[in-house]
Image (cartoon, rainbow, N blue to C red):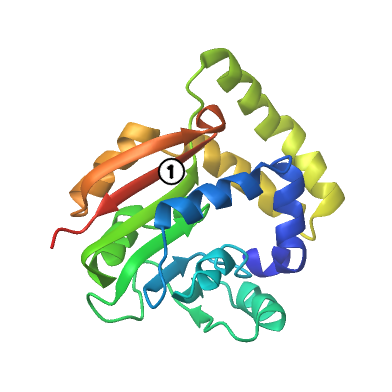
């Protein structure tokens, strides 16, 4: 499915989020706080748009994605990045490798969320961190109703106008509605081993930024 939307993926996301995705990615970059020579794993990196802010800090960033189509499009644009094909539930990396692991708008598309959270924990070095940016549940009830209507009614026709595979975005809308709320995801992070778990709402809870640490 994601292979089919790869060519226009970044444009489509920009249109569907009304430009908010740029702000969300800036928040992710600040939360990850990548430093020179640190190793950063960017999961569900797609075409590596999300990886670029980490690379600019001097960190060594590995864009990893399950979709070969996404990786191929990304490699054409950013030939210097070490794109890696990988399943988030069985990551092709050794234990305790990365200073930080991050995933933006991809965790809900993994078949086994809990297995992915455990794998992220495994490949993170002691003292390292995880940052998860994902669609969530707006905290203000009236806005939550409007948002749900947008997802199910407005998103598909907009996707048809700008995406190479609009049916994929119908699935994405449904997956957002079914995704656990902020406290539920935080609980799953703790069960996977992460400590000091916290989250921050962005755009009224349309998106939530979850963080956790691996004890030294």
Query: In the rendered image, is residue 165 in sight?
Result: yes
Residue occupying the point 67% across, 25% down: 149
Q: In which quarter of the image is the N terminus?
A: bottom right
The picture places residue 72, in percent across and down from the top left corner, at: 66, 81
Disc 1 secondary structure class: strand
Q: Above or below — where is 90 with respect to 29? A: below
Q: Above or below — where is 126 with respect to 26? A: below
Q: Above or below — where is 77 with respect to 159? A: below
Q: Above or below — where is 119 with respect to 162? A: below
The picture places residue 123, in percent across and down from the top left corner, at: 27, 72
The picture places residue 177, in percent across and down from the top left corner, at: 53, 35
- Res 117 quadrant in image: bottom left
The picture places residue 156, in percent across and down from the top left corner, at: 75, 41
Count the numbered circles shown.
1
- Residue nearest the viewer, comparing 199 with 1: 199
Q: Residue furthest left?
A: 216
Q: Residue furthest right?
A: 161
- Residue nearest the viewer, comparing 140 with 86: 140
Residue occupying the point 51% across, 47% down: 27
- Residue nearest the viewer, comparing 102 with 34: 34
Say which residue label 1 marks. 209
Residue occupying the point 28% across, 50% down: 212
Q: Quadrant of the C terminus?
A: bottom left
């Amino acid at each position: 499915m994601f292979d089919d939307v790869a060519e226009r993926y970044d444009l489509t996301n920009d249109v569907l989020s009304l430009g908010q995705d740029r702000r969300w990615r800036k928040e992710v970059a600040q939360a990850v706080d990548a430093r020179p020579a640190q190793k950063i794993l960017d999961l569900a990196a797609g075409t590596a748009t999300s990886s670029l802010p980490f690379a600019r800090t001097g960190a060594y960033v590995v864009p990893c994605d399950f979709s070969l189509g996404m990786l191929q499009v990304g490699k054409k644009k950013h030939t210097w990045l070490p794109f890696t094909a990988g399943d988030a539930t069985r990551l092709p990396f050794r234990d305790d490798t990365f200073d930080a692991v991050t995933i933006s708008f991809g965790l809900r598309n993994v078949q086994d969320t809990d297995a992915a959270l455990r794998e992220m924990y495994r490949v993170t070095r002691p003292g390292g961190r995880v940052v998860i940016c994902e669609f969530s549940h707006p905290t203000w009830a009236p806005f939550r109703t409007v948002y749900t209507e947008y997802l199910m009614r407005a998103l598909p026709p907009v996707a048809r106008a700008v995406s190479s595979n609009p049916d994929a975005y119908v699935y994405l809308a449904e997956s957002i509605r079914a995704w656990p709320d902020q406290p539920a995801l935080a609980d799953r992070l703790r069960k996977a081993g992460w400590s000091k778990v916290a989250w921050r709402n962005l755009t009224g809870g349309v998106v939530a930024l979850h963080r956790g640490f691996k004890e030294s």
